[in-house]
Image (tube, rainbow, N blue to C red):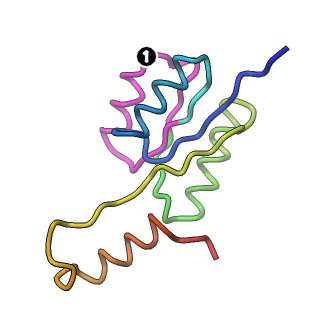
Amino acid sequence: MQKTPTIVITGSASGIGYGLAQQFLARGCRVMLADLPGNRLDAAAAALGTPERAGSRACDVSQREQLQELWDAAVARFGRVDFWINNAGVGPPVIRLDAVPPDWLDRAIDVNIDDGR
């Protein structure tokens, strides 16, 4: 008997992450959506229309404790995590690089390339 995979997708309230969630659900998988708190995440989860196989959890991927809480929520909901897709990311403002505020650069590093060390 084949087990139903459980997939956690960060940055899944829109774009590629949301598209991945749709496709995994269409193939019978269970999916835990994760994105920053707010209406986008709630709307994305509701739009999927499969509450028995889709959950959601607000998560800022730059905050290690929130990542652990996301893992724990997925395990509590579905029993395990089989795949984790790090899709969350932030894009640069459309301005000259030398005009990008330092706090934005710090945020981009924390979200996009922080290795957790």
Q: Where does the magenta region start and end?
A: 33-56
In the displayed orientation, state which residue is furthest to the right.
1
Q: Quadrant of residue 99?
A: bottom left
Dot 1: few (<14), some (14–19), or many (≥20) neighbours within 10 Å? few
Q: Nearer the viewer, residue 37 or 102?
A: 102
Above or below residue 43? Residue 109 is: below
Above or below residue 71? Residue 79 is: above
54 in magenta: yes
Give coordinates of residue 104: x percent, y percent.
29, 74
Residue drawn at the location 55% of the way across and 35% of the way down: 32
Q: Secondary structure at mark 1?
A: loop
Q: Quadrant of residue 75?
A: top right
Can you say which quadrant of the picture contains the N terminus? top right
Amino acid marked by disc 1: Gly
Q: Quadrant of residue 81?
A: top right
Instruction: Look at mark 1 in the image and give the residue it sits on.
Output: 49
Residue drawn at the location 43% of the way across and 16% of the way down: 49
In the displayed orientation, state which residue is furthest to the front.
96
* Residue 61 placement, left or right of 1: left
* Residue 99 placement, left or right of 71: left
